[in-house]
Image: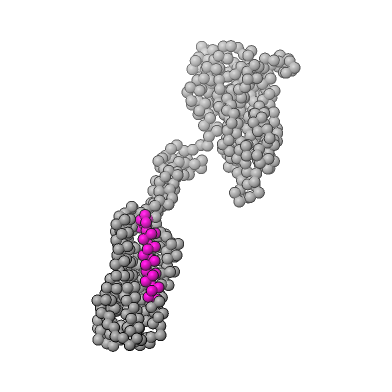
Amino acid sequence: DEATLKSDARTLQVSEYKDKHFKNITIRGGVLIAPPFAIYDEDSGVYTGFQGDLLRRLQIFAKADGYNLNFELELSPPQYGPALDLIANDCNSTVNPNMIEECQRFDLIIGDYYVNAPRSLRIDFSPTWLKTTISTIKTIKDPKDKAAQLTDFTTLTQLQAGGGTACVPEGAYLSDVVMKKFPKANYNDCPSPDECIQRLRDGVCSLYADDELALRYRALDDRSLEVTGEQFNTQYIVWPISYNMDKEKSLLLKKWMYTSVSNATLDDLSYKYFDVKMCPLGLAGLNCDKNCDPRQGTSDRDGKCICQSSKWTGEDCSIEVEEDLKLYPDWEVYLAYGLFAINTLACLLCFVWVHLKRETRLVKMWQPFFLKFILLGCFVSSASIIPTTQQSEGYGPVHGCLVFPWLYCIGCSITLGTLLSKIFRVYRLFQAASRAQRVMITARETLLMIFGITIVDVVVIAVWTGVAPLQWKRTITSTDHFGQPLSSVGYCTSNYWKVFVTIIVTWHLVLMFMASYLCYLTRNISSQFAESKYLAISLFSNLQITVLSIPVLIIVGADPSTSLFIRAVVIWINDFAVLGIIFGKC
């Protein structure tokens, strides 16, 4: 087990077993120090790291086959090239000036070497024990530091185009690969990986190119470093083996290395040294002793349960965030009901007053017939506030969408028609008087005028309802990266609402301008005998509110935080102003 392997760390040089029937095999190795692949503790003389753990695993596999596998290890030269020369088959040559005796010191080099064609002519290779690529690492810049952002390259392609500098390990094979792939970039050769990292921090270079696994290892414990994810030129990591190594030893060593591949030993070691340690799925916390909903969250490197979507929240990502339906706030709904109640009460009080004062001179002059029609129109249009408060958490139906245009348009047309017929009656009477003529305008004629004006609205609304009625629609305004809705907004709409609203508004404006023109013509008539002054004020109030409210309603649109409030206030103030102006005089 792992504890046994660690306790055996000091026995790598010479391993002695009491069972005499085990066959002893000794392999001489030179260790190329390159954390985390190979680490050497000078005080204890123990070799650790990825390859140290792998050597101990190989000893276990050997014992299962009846062999006591001993490794006689010593430090090799610190550079890859000189270390490889010690086991190459070209010793005592111009290429490799090492003496033959020197080249017989080791059977293999315990180092993270890449496979390439020139090396294959000089040495034998062990089975591949890791696969890697060439990648880059950078320091994490402050997003507020604009000057630093100018040299914040993510890839060597960007660095080359931007004229930046990359640090590369001096004399390494991968440095030649990088320089050939990006020949126009600027390079800074570092004598060691630590020096490359320091130059990266000092701003000498913007990226540091090296073995991806080595870079990932450095970034595990250093939050200021970030592996960019750039990958190119896949490399296979092996141990170089001398062609002079005993054939039986070579074959057995390769067999046990293949065992480490097949039983996932290499996968375990790779995870141990190069991957950020996360809690198992479903767990979180520094000691992985807390729950984290496996369907909605995963633990980060600090043990915090991170929800995969903003649709979920809570320490364990088990609480579903309700979709923000952007419904009308309760205060707006209550306010709308209150405004309707105010107008309803005002209409009721005015109706009672007209009925009680119907025999008085003032009421007779204004005519109870007209006053009651104005009250009817204001009440009907004010009643349209109620359907505007209706809404649905889903996709409907909302019957208020269909009712609203009927109530509002018919109420407005009754009110406008009554005001227009009243001012038109006054205009005809005094025109006749100015010509010394007598004219009689019956209630039937007035009713027909009001009916004619109202029927236009009825026809338009009926066509609108038949062709493309207003219906409740809910539109999703934001989703998470899984497509789950986070917020949506509901509103009444139809395919041709702009066309019909334009027709209705234009018709009402025409009526207002006609009535205003008649008021202008009768402006010199004494208000003691004509109501043209107050009719003009109420008409001007209607016109002003309509003109101002249209752009406001367009701006707020379907925003639930303001749209209901604006619509309710516009309807209320329009009707209440008419009641105040007409009945305030009375």
Left or right, 446 with respect to 185, comes to left
Residue 475 appears anywhere in the view: yes
Q: Say above or below: 414 vs 268.
A: below
* Residue interval drawn in magenta: 490-516
Q: Position of residue 29 (x, y in %)?
A: 63, 20
User: In the picture shown, does residue 43 fall above or below 534?
Assistant: above
Number of labels in the image equals 0
Q: Relative to 232, is 292 on the left or the right?
A: left
Q: Position of residue 117 (x, y in %)?
A: 63, 20
Residue at image x 40%, y 73%? 513
- The image's colour scheme reads one colour
Task: Give residue 370's position: percent from left, percent from top.
Answer: 29, 78
Residue nearest the observer in this picture, 80 or 353: 353
Residue 204, picture quadrant: top right
Q: From the viewer's perspective, is 174 left or right of 297?
A: right
Rendered location of residue 493, percent (x, y): 36, 57
Q: Main secondary structure of the magenta part?
A: helix
Kindly identify the residue that appears in the image at 29 percent across and 57 percent down: 466
Q: As displayed, is residue 273 above or below residue 21? A: below
Q: Does residue 208 appear to the left or right of 337 in the view shown?
A: right
Residue at 37% of width from left, 81% of height from top? Answer: 532
Q: Is residue 513 magenta?
A: yes
Quadrant where the C terminus is found in the figure: bottom left
Can residue 18 be seen from the camera position used here? no
Q: Quadrant of residue 110?
A: top right
Measuring 51% from the left and 11% from the top, which residue is drawn there?
Answer: 21
Q: Nearer the viewer, residue 376 or 234?
A: 376
